Image (cartoon, grey):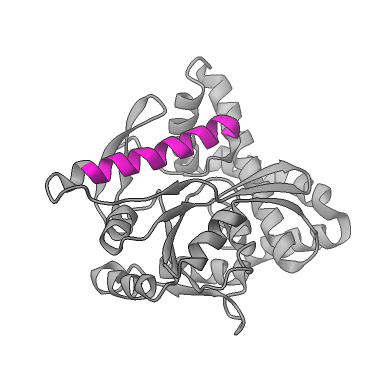
Amino acid sequence: MPETIEKTPRGNAIGFWFFKIFLRFGGLYAAYMLLLGVSLHYWLFDKKTVKSSTAYLKRRFPLDSKAVIRLKVYKLIFNQGKQLIDRAAHTAGIVKFDINFMGRDILNEIIASKKGFILLTAHAGNWQLAMTELNMLEKKIFLVILDENNNSVRKALNINDDNSIFGIISPEQHLGGIVPVVKELNCGNAVSYMGDRPYGFESVKIDFMGDKAHFPYGAFAIAAATKVPIVTALASKTGLKTYKVDFTNIIKPEYKSRANKKMQLTEWVQEYADILNNFFQEYPYHCFLFHDVWKNK
């Protein structure tokens, strides 16, 4: 299940078919009931997911025992599964979600300026559902994602549709796809990066949940070089059929001098990490990083 519902059970299209059947004939509650058993499978047998989830949860809940943390790993896996089901239900038009959109005025102001911008997402909450709310933009949005993730993202955002506002740039291109990224930003379009994935960029050490963690600075370096703002995207599940989509956190990287550029990049990455930390404090079971950012790789 981590990271896409299309792999539930892993690599098994029949598993995904079952979820769609349960959604169509039983609604969200029926699909969530099926999810209980699937989540148990990952909780028991997916050692990598359990280990990375534990790295997060023991820092979010430092006073909890190992046994309690292990139980919370199941809750975290189950909560990600629910949001993946919600995404599938939303994309297929099976369920209509009530979405509280925050930051529309900010986005309209950026659009009116004719400038491009970087949309910074993360494996936090339902980021793909947040993307579906951007159809009102008069800009093309290019997602920087690995080729292996193309199919699931294309389905979720209807990228194959000729009228879609979304496009894809592969970070596996020459120089990590920087050339087409800069081209689109200079044309006034938006480029979306996952702020918790390096995609070939180096990382810097910042404070995250009371410990030193490693986050990539690539998106911030590009924003500073092209002089465009960074808009963070966070989508939180607030009820059975309700979400809050927040685009109000804006970071404006701008080098103050040519010296100590890495130090300046670190400050902006820290600002982003603080935004994520605040989000995870409010929604502790919306953290789907599923890799240990505190371990230097």
* Location of residue 198 in the rendering, given as x and y in whole percent from the top left corner: 33, 54
Which residue shows up at 19% across the image and 45% down it? 262
* Location of residue 153 in the rendering, given as x and y in whole percent from the top left corner: 55, 67
Q: In this view, does 236 lie to the left or right of 184?
A: right
Q: Nearer the viewer, residue 39 or 108?
A: 108
Q: Does the magenta stretch include residue 206?
A: no
Instruction: Tell which residue pokes out farthest to the left in this image.
Output: 259
Which residue shows up at 21% across the image and 47% down it? 256
**Height in image: 108 above or below 49?**
below
Q: Is residue 196 left or right of residue 24?
A: left
Residue 297 at least partly seen: no
Is the stretch drawn in magenta largely helix, strand or loop?
A: helix
**Height in image: 269 above or below 280?**
below
Residue bounds of the magenta highlight: 264-284
Residue 93 at least partly seen: yes
Q: Is residue 271 magenta?
A: yes
**On-image quarter of the C terminus:** top left
Which residue shows up at 41% across the image and 43% down it? 291
* Location of residue 238 in the rendering, given as x and y in whole percent from the top left corner: 71, 41
Which residue shows up at 45% across the image and 73% down it? 168
* Location of residue 52 in the rendering, given as x and y in whole percent from the top left corner: 44, 38
Q: Nearer the viewer, residue 16 or 196?
A: 196
Q: Which of 127 and 26 is in front in this view?
A: 127
